[in-house]
Structures are given as structure tokens and as C-alpha cells.
Amino acid sequence: MISKFDRFQKRRLISSYFSVVLSIFLMLFLLGVLGLFVINSKNLSDDFKEDITMTVFFKNEATTDSLQLFEAQLKSAKWVKDFKYVPKEVAAKEHQAVIGEDFMEFLGMNPLQNSFDIHLKANYVVNDSIEKIQSKLRENQMISDASYDKQLVTLVNNNIEKVSMWILIVSGVMALIAVLLINSALRLSIHSNRFIIKTMQMVGATKSFIRRPFIWKGILLGIIGAVFAVVALMGLLYYLDTTFPSLGILRDQIMTGAVLLGVLVTGIIVTAISTFIATTRFLNLRTDDLY
């Protein structure tokens, strides 16, 4: 018949394991979220860069053939993500919708020009590259101008560099905090077994023999916590992908899978190392220090 003390000890042990698994789950989940943010931050920054438009205006004397030739050149250009031809009649209607009146009636003519709105690939949305492209386009005698928001390009690139640096710093700090908290939770769990450890040592058990079951139990708890974290991350990814499909959160499936696998591996490695260190600490304590 199980005594009240045994039941109390069993409940305390289960509570201890639950707190360890919960700590591992929370830390690995937060670490996984940060990892997913890091790999998707480049995609987000690239999307923002590729939303910046370069507008190429053609002179009124530009023929249909010259416009078609330029369109063909854009299709083969490696720096072009996409483009749209905007006839001056369409541009006039868009301006009328913005200002709320027919400016052509006042001027008696359409002063606008045929143009192409070009979105560049993210790698080319830096001042040096985009200025070279602009200069190259202006060599076309049928082009009156090629313009883009230079200040916006500078601002975007500077901010992306700053954000990337802070992401790396935060990632490092979060990884360190996760390791320390998981280590602390496992130490508290092993602390309740310190007398058992010392008793086994006193009857002649070797340190490796004593450590082995604790390490395997720590790894098991790490796997359980990591699996819960991976499942929660997959649920978060599914929610974001269905709610905000424009983010393309699952665009890079290889890197996403690597983060999820990294969460699982981290849970195993950190718990194994933390359990090894914690058990070694209690093995090296004197009997009087256990109290």
C-alpha cells in the first residue's frame, strides 16, 4: 500500500518534470520564433526594397517600335523583377483621380509622357547599383529621364543594416538566456535527487554509472519540450501563412525546416550538457554540503 509520503513524493516529482518540460518548451519556442524572424527578415527587407519604383519617362517623339524594343530589353535584364508600361493617357486618368479635377481641360493638352514603372531586384536596390542602372538608361536617346526616390533607398538600406545588427545581438542574448534557464530548471530537478546521488556514490557506484540515467532522463525531457515547441512553431507558421499570405512566411522551406530541426537538436544538446554539469556538481559535493 502506497503511503501518503510516497504519493507526495510522486506528485512532487511529476510537478518537477512538468516545470522542466514547460521551461524547455517556452525557451525553445521563443528561440524558434526568433530564428524564424531572422530567416524571414531578409525576405521582408527584400520585399520592401522591391516595392521601390524606378520610373522611366519616354520623349513624345518615341515611336511604338522604340517602346517595344525597350520592353524586350527589360524582359531580358537581370536586374528587373517586374515592370509595367504606363501610357500617358492612363497616367493622366490616374492624376485626375488623385487631384480631383481635369487638368488637361485647363492646360488644353496632356503634358505627361509614356513611361515604364520598374521594380528592381532587391540586390540592385543600393545606391551604387541603382545609379549605374539609371545612368545606363539615360544613354537611350528616346528616354527623357529615369527617376527614383534616392532618399528612400538610402534610408531603407541604412535601417536594414541597423536592424540586422540588433537582430544578431538579440539572438545571441536570447540564446544565452534560453541555455541558462533550461540549465537552471534541470539543476532544480536534479537537486531533489541529490541524496540518492550521494547514496549511490557511497555504495561504490561510479560517477558515469550514476550520471547515465539522469542524462537520459534529461534528454527525454528535452525531446518532449522540443517537440512541443516544434508543434507550436508549426502552428504559428500555418496561422501566419494563412492569415498573411503576402508575407511568404513559408517561402524558404529549407531554412524553415532547418530552424525547426535546430530547435529539436538544441533541446537535446542543452539538456544533455546541463544534466551532465548538474549531476557532476552534486557528485563532487561533500555529504555535509548537501544540506
Image (cartoon, grey):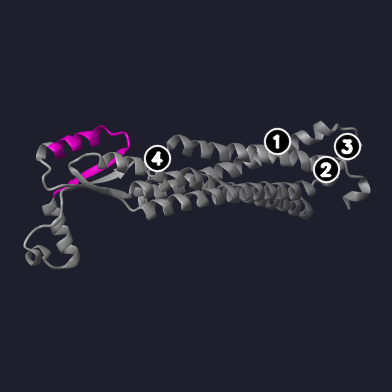
Type of amino acid under label 2: Arg
| Residues shaded magenta | 66-87
Residue 43 visible in the current orientation:
yes
Name the residue that disc number 3 marks.
Answer: 201
Q: Quadrant of residue 63?
A: top left
178 or 157: which is nearer to us?
157
Question: Which residue corresponds to the image point at 7% horizontal and 59% vertical from the top-left?
Answer: 109
Question: Which residue corresponds to the image point at 52% horizontal and 39% vertical from the top-left?
Answer: 259
In the picture, the disc for residue 4 is none
How far, Cα to Cα, is label 4 from label 3?
A: 62 Å
How far, Cα to Cα, is label 4 from label 1?
A: 48 Å
**Left or right of 62 on screen, residue 288:** right
Type of amino acid under label 4: Asn
In the picture, the disc for residue 281 is 2
Q: Position of residue 160 (x, y in %)?
A: 47, 50
> From what the image shows, is residue 209 above or below residue 291?
above
Name the residue that disc number 4 marks.
Answer: 123
Name the residue that disc number 1 marks.
Answer: 216
153 or 280: which is nearer to us?
153
**Left or right of 135 on screen, residue 180:** right
Q: Earlier in the sequence, mark 2 or mark 1?
A: 1
- Give the mark toward the camera: 2 or 1: 2
Give the crowd class for mark 4: few <14, some 14-19, many >=20 residues within 10 Å.
few
